[in-house]
Image: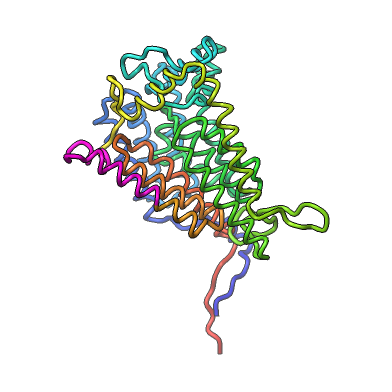
Amino acid sequence: MATTTPLTLPDQHREPPPRLGGALWWALCATAALGLAVFSALGPHRVWGAAAALGYLAAALLTARGRSPRIAGAVALAGAVPLPLLWLLAVDLAQLEVRVVARSAGLLLAEGTPYLQHPVVPEDFNPYLPGMAVFGLPEALAGPGPFTDPRLWMGAAFLGALAFALPAGDRSAPLRWIAACPLVALPLAVGGVDLPVAGLMCLGLALAGRGRAGAAGLALGAAAALKWTAWPAIPVAVALLAAASRSTSAGRPADGGEGRGDSRRPAVRREGLGGSRRPADRAAARCGLVALLTAAALVLPAALRDPGAFRAHVVDFPLGLTDAVSSAASPLPGHLLATHVPGGRTLALLLLGVSALLVALSLLLRPPATASDAAARLALGLLLAIAFMPASRFGYLVHPLVLAVWAAARQTPGHPLLVRVGKQVSR
């Protein structure tokens, strides 16, 4: 018979045994970072690769010697984020996205639009939605400096949104792990516009799971004002709220708490005389409406200021419809089809459309029941989109990665060291 008993006080402070998988994981991270340091043509990436490889290698050695996973993770994190970030800030080196965001903020303040009117070379283009310029405002207002660098504010927005989206009391460990992961640590150090988008998507789904439809709409609308990649999160959150409100109305508990099985707070609050519940889809409609209005309020003023420039930067350039073609492409299936197969671009777009249709049908036929389910569904949809886009890159994988890790963190009902399962043979 399996029984669960609380650990004694000494057990709770005892470190878990070292795991070979931990050492192997850090060794793989070190190999990836070292490969980037050796083969990358980008200076910021080479700096990050060299510093991160040292941190990951030290973490692998510490784990193999039986040191605490917490200590090994802290060493890996220090080598992968603060060390290269401080060095890059000291020498004023960043990848192109950081300079684009800083320039867009200056243009927004001076001309009311973050887009150059006559872009010529790829470096002139700003493929992000107007909301992204907010991260460049400190530099535009106070001048360049280590504390006004846009990557600091993008990283802070990501970590802050993700922390609020995680279950209370269990935030530090998932944050440390995900920040030390190479796909996240690299943009944290060199500058990555995808991180705040991913963090706000997690926050929006978390708020939707708690039944806070208006707040979820605000978070998702803010994400949608940064990049187009955030827009699929809105229908996923709407489907989550609609399904949760129906299940609550039917008398079943919804995912209103911070972890699986926690029904302390229903997804849809009671209101009105006699405790009657609001109609099934009102919360979902409110979330979608608030998200669309928030995104419109942040995007339309700049878009209407110069519609031609907006279309050239945000629509034509990413789709390869301008004379200056973006070089942001990695050897993913969609890019390989578009490059090496006759008619491959059309085939890639067809696969992309079919994937989107299948995900949309899954939301209608089997909507997500919890915020974790919604995050997993969104991660799958974004992964398919990244795979089949004709021009995509590996950095976009940070979206499904963050969503998947956040969903896994929510699925943990409690700290694994708080209970022990023992097998007893009944006589």
Residue for point 54% across, 31% down: 156
Q: Residue furthest right?
A: 273
Q: Nearer the viewer, residue 323 or 169?
A: 323
Image coords of residue 425 (percent x, y): 53, 84
| Residue 283 at least partly seen | yes
User: Does the stretch in magenta take in 353?
Assistant: yes
Q: Quadrant of the N terminus?
A: bottom right
Position of 59 with respect to 288 (left or right) is left
Residue at image location 52% in from the left, 56% down from the top: 368
User: Where 380 falls versus 331 (above or below)?
Assistant: below
Q: How is the image coloured?
A: rainbow
The answer to whether residue 342 is magenta is yes
Q: Is residue 252 above or below residue 287?
A: below
Residue 125's place in the image compared with 267, above or below, is above
User: Which residues, given as a range, are shown in magenta?
Assistant: 332-357
Magenta span: chief secondary structure: helix
